[in-house]
Structures are given as structure tokens and as C-alpha cells.
Image (cartoon, helix red, strand yellow):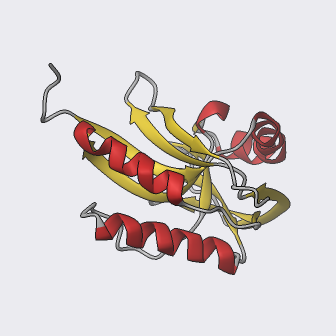
Amino acid sequence: MSDPRATRRVFFALWPGEALRIAAGDAFAAAIAAAGGRAVPPENLHVTLEFLGAVPVARLGELEAIGAAVRLPAAELVLDRLAGWSRGEALVALAGDVPVALAALQSDLRNALRERGFRVDSRAFRPHLTLARKLRAPFTAAACTPLRWPCATLALVASEPHPGGSRYQPLGLWPPAHDA
């Protein structure tokens, strides 16, 4: 019998396929090397839509149902700026413009979670791709070659602690629904 107090640290994200992971690694390799620090492993790359933190394992089915109900828009995020975040300890790629459809998706997801009693982030949605952590020096914001990140797959992801940094394990993946 499982512990009713057991939790998992989870979030919803846009989850990339292998080709996008490779493209992101290629696009940002020089910036990551220049910034120093610990590069995010390619298998952990994602764009967070909503971070939930510790959620009771007994409620993960509710989150899967919410994920299955989400309809991804035909939109893409264009990551075209680099910046240092968290007091300069993280290197992130940001979008100069957030597609209206993506902002609406995130808002709808946040509202669905809130309606079911999940704790959601109160901060404004700022889609980003974390590239490196624990930078050796502050990173000065700069433009970069744009990387197009399509809204191709929604994921419910668990963050598992490991030596050297967390590992992310998708608990559910939902590609866009295709209308017949």
C-alpha cells in the first residue's frame, strides 16, 4: 500500500522532440559555453507552462485528465533573446513576443488547475528555456539567432532529484489533437 502523504514535484510544459532538442543544443552551445556553469542536459529541455511543485501522488490522475483536455494551439514560440535570471545564476532563452494563442493556452491551463484546487504560480507567464545553471559570472542580456519552438507536445513532468541536478520524467504526453 502506498503512502497517502507521498508527493511528486511536477509541472506542465511544452516538451520538445529529439530534433528540437538537437536544434536547441546547436543554437545555444556558444552562449552556454561563454556563460559557464552547468548546462541543462538535453533530455531536460522544456518550456514550462505551469509549475505546481509538490502534488500528492493520489491527485496525479486529475492532472493527467487536465492535460488530456488541453488543446494545443497551432502556434510557435520564437526564442530570440538570452538573459541571466535568478540573480544571474541561470542562462535562459526568451521570446521577444509571446503568441496570443500560447498565452491563452497557459491562462486556460492555470485556470483549470486553480478550479480543481491546485496551487498555481501568481507571477505573469514568461515563457523561457533554461539553458544553464550556476553560471560562473553574470550574463549580459543579448539577442540571439532565433529558435522556433512549436506548440507540438504538452507534457506533465515529474522532477526527480539526482546528484548533479534534477532529472525530468514525463508522466503524460499529449500531442495536438487533429480535427477530422
Q: Nearer the viewer, residue 121 or 105?
A: 105
Residue at image position (49%, 53%) is 67
**Residue 50 x %, y %:** 45, 60
Against 149, residue 168 (above or below) is above
Residue at 47% x, 66% y is 109
Residue 153, x across and y down, in percent? 66, 49
Which image quadrant is residue 16 in? top right
| Residue projecting furthest to the right | 145
Q: Relative to residue 143, is residue 155 depicted above or below?
A: above
Q: Locate the N terminus by quadrant.
A: top left
- Is residue 135 visible to the viewer in this orientation of the structure? yes
* Residue at image point 45% right, 30% down: 165
Q: Nearer the viewer, residue 7 or 36?
A: 7
* Left or right side of 134 for 9: left
Residue 89 visible somewhere in the drawing: no
Locate the C terminus and report the quarter of the image it occupies.
bottom right
At x 67%, y 64%, the residue is 94
Is residue 56 or residue 125 the one in the foreground? 56
Quadrant in the picture for residue 97 = bottom right
Q: Is residue 40 left or right of residue 27?
A: left
Which residue, as the protein is rendered here, is positioned at the far front?
A: 180
